[in-house]
Structure formats: C-alpha cells, structure tokens
Amino acid sequence: MPTQRKSAGFTIVELLVIIGIIAILIGLLLPALSGVQARGKKLTEASQLRSIGTAWSMYADLNKQAILPGYIEPEAQERWRLQYEYPAPLQQGDPTSHIIDPEVAAPWTWRLLPLLDYNADLIRGYTGEAFSPDHPLLYDVEDPTNLDRPLTVALEPSFGYNAFYVGGWLDVVSMGDSSEVVQPRYWNARDAETNERVNVIARSMNQIRRPSELITFSSASRFDTPAVYPSINDDRPGSHLVTPTRLAEDEQWRSLTSNASSDLVSSTASGNFSANPHTIQTLASPAHAPIARYNRLVSYLRADGSTDTAAVAELTSQRLWIDTADRRDFIHTEE
C-alpha cells in the first residue's frame, strides 16, 4: 500500500518561533553594534583632532612661536592689511575672485586650512559629508560670490577653539591717547579676587606654563537660547569657538551634575528629569560650550598636542581653559 509522505516544510508555529528567536537576537546585537560604531567614530574624531593639533603647532613654528589667533575682526584685518586666499583662483581672469571675504576669514578656520591641505573632512567630519572636487565643501565653484558655504566652514567646524584665552580674539581698541591699536579682548584684565593685573591670554607658545593641561580645541556647539540641554545630537552644528564656564565675570554655561541643587533641575514636556554629568545649562546668548558626540564624552586637545575625552562635568575648572588661572573658580575683570 502506498504511504503518505510527511511534508518537509515548516508549520506556522515553527516559523513564528524562528522569527521570534531572530528578533530577540537582533535586539541583543543592535546595542553592541551601535556601541562599536560609536567607538569607531570616536577614534576618527580623535584622529581628526590630532591633525588639527599638528597644524596648530606648525602655524606657531612658521610664525616665530606666535599662536594662531582665534578670531580677527574685519576691522583688525583692514588695519593690519591682511588678506587670505582660497587654494586657487575661482574665476580665470579675475584677480580678486580668490580673496576670502574678511567675515569668512575672521575665525581661525580658514587660516589653518592651508596647513591641513584644505581637507574638509578634518574640519567638517561630524557631518558625514564627503569632500570631492565635484562637490567641494570649502567654496562654491559655480558661484564664487556665494558666501554660504565658506562661511559655514568657517563658523561650524567640528572643533571649537579656546580663542579668547589661546591666541586671542583680536579687535581694534581705542587707547587713552585717542589712538587705536589691534589688541585681543581681555588684554587689560585683573584678578577679581586680588585686583592684581594678570595676563590671561597665551599669544606665544613660550608663554604657556601648563601645556599638558591647557585646552586648545574641543568638540563644541553654539547655543543661541539660554536653556537646559539634557542631550545633544551627534550631528548638531559645530562652533568655531568654545569657552570656559565664564568669560571674564559673565557665566556662559554650567554642567548639571547628579548632585545639582533643585534650581538646576529643569522640566520638559515629558516631565521632570534629574540632571546628569552630560547635561549642560547655557546662560549666555549665544553660548559656545563643549559638547559630547558619539559616546557622551567631549573630545579635546591640549597645548602639548595630546588628546583626551571627558564628561562635560569634568571640564568646568577655569584652570583647564586659562593658563594663568591659579584656581578652578578663577574670575577676572575686564577694564
């Protein structure tokens, strides 16, 4: 008698069990894969930061140990007759087309780019955009008069520069005899506690006393609205500037730790949350604060070329940002 052969296929129940097992395995693997990806991005960020540090040191070597200025106001550029150029003329026959607009050249970015071989990935790596001759990030070949792209490169790089206290923010200053000179802001500072004159700006490599501590660059962003920020997106626009918690006597930002007092706990649409070492509160408008990308840690570069990472809460000491500060709560006045 012929016998019936059992089907070799799976039953619906067996398929559901298999799908459930696969879903569980995916759920277990995704966090691990996400962590590996974040670590990879963090390593890339550290490599980019070291390249920035090498170029920063090269600038000093080429300029008799003068430190790269953090910002040169257009008026100061005009007084010093400074002009910066794109890597090549953008229009044949036009001798002015390769001159960078003073507003674009004001931040440190375009002054350091020649020492980085105009590598946009080192400047704008967090965006994930790839640089190519066909789609340049540095300037608009089609329309050289369009400042949007070069200005974005100048103002929103991956890393902010400690520009007020390293290199200096240069502006035209009126002196007591009615003359005008180019001076960095806070050049006439006094210790708020002792009222003694103090030089808070390192303008020469030879002036730096604590190169293994002084922060020069860090991952940073600009915050236009004073608020509490419990989390930061990895692709949040960067800033050319980063500041310590205080500029002179004005508080810029603070870290909200788990031990924060009740007045530092904010309410959101989803309810109250407890502050943590990664949460920042901005108090100035705008504020340029260090931010954590990829693994909730801020990447930063020291004056000696070494890099490191830390939670925002670990970067609140003024000694990390001002080379001559003798205490973590150092405050200076501006005359």
Image (spheres, grey):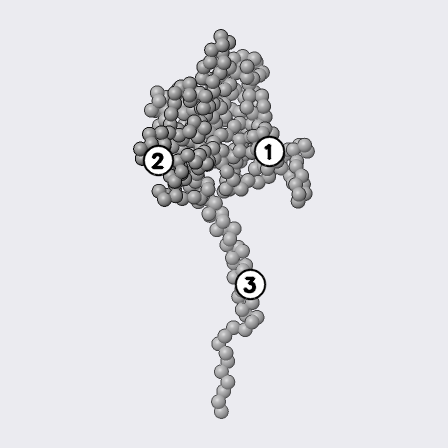
Identify the residue at horizontal 66%, vertical 44% (top origin): 270
Marker disc for residue 20: 3
Q: Tell which circle, 3 or 1, labels the residue nearer the N-terminal end.
A: 3
Three-letter code, disc 3: Gly
Residue 282's tag is none
Residue 121 percent location from the top left of the image: 40, 40
Disc 1 marks which amino acid? Answer: Thr
Residue sitting at x 49%, y 91%: 1
Mark 1 vs mark 2: give the one in front.
Answer: 2
Instruction: Locate residue 229, reporting x and y percent.
Output: 59, 37
Query: Residue drawn at (51%, 53%), measured in percent from left and top?
Result: 30
- Give how far across and how far down residue 268 sits, in percent: 65, 41
State the image quarter where residue 101 is shown.
top left
Q: Amino acid at mark 2?
A: Leu
Numbered mark located on residue 90 in the image: 2
Q: Earlier in the sequence, mark 2 or mark 3?
A: 3
Residue 225, numbered circle: 1
